[in-house]
Image (cartoon, rainbow, N blue to C red):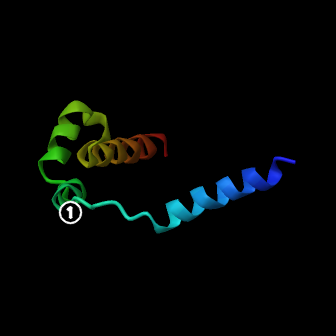
Amino acid sequence: MGRGRQKAKHTKVARDLKYFSPDTNYSALEQELGGGSRLEEDLEKWPEYSAEDDADDADDLDADESKSA
């Protein structure tokens, strides 16, 4: 018996979500997508994820392969 009321509530919520358009902070979005200094901070915190370390690892693998061959 309560299915009609439940379905109506879900429809209302879905419609509200579909047509909801929040204000967008474009300056914050630009900073987040730009990278910039944030990337440098992250690389200082987690140096194992830097691209330079990956290149060093690849060189180590090449050296190991040449020794075993």
Apparent side of residue 22 relative to residue 45 in the rendered image (left or right): right
Which image quadrant is residue 24 in? bottom left
- Image spot of residue 53 (x, y percent): 27, 42
Q: Which residue is mark 1?
A: 26
Q: Residues within 10 Å of mark 1 (few under 14, many from 20)?
A: few
Apparent side of residue 5 relative to residue 61 in the rendered image (left or right): right
Q: Residue furthest top?
A: 45
Up/down of 8 relative to 60, above or below: below
Residue at position x 52%, y 66% in the image: 18
Apparent side of residue 27 relative to residue 24 in the rendered image (left or right): left
Q: Nearer the viewer, residue 46 or 38?
A: 38
Helix, strand, or loop for circle 1?
Answer: helix
Residue at position x 47%, y 68% in the image: 19
- Image spot of residue 23 (x, y percent): 28, 61
The amino acid beneath tag 1 is Tyr
Q: Nearer the viewer, residue 16 or 46?
A: 16
- Image spot of residue 49 (x, y percent): 31, 40
Up/down of 41 relative to 51, above or below: above
Q: Nearer the viewer, residue 35 or 62?
A: 35
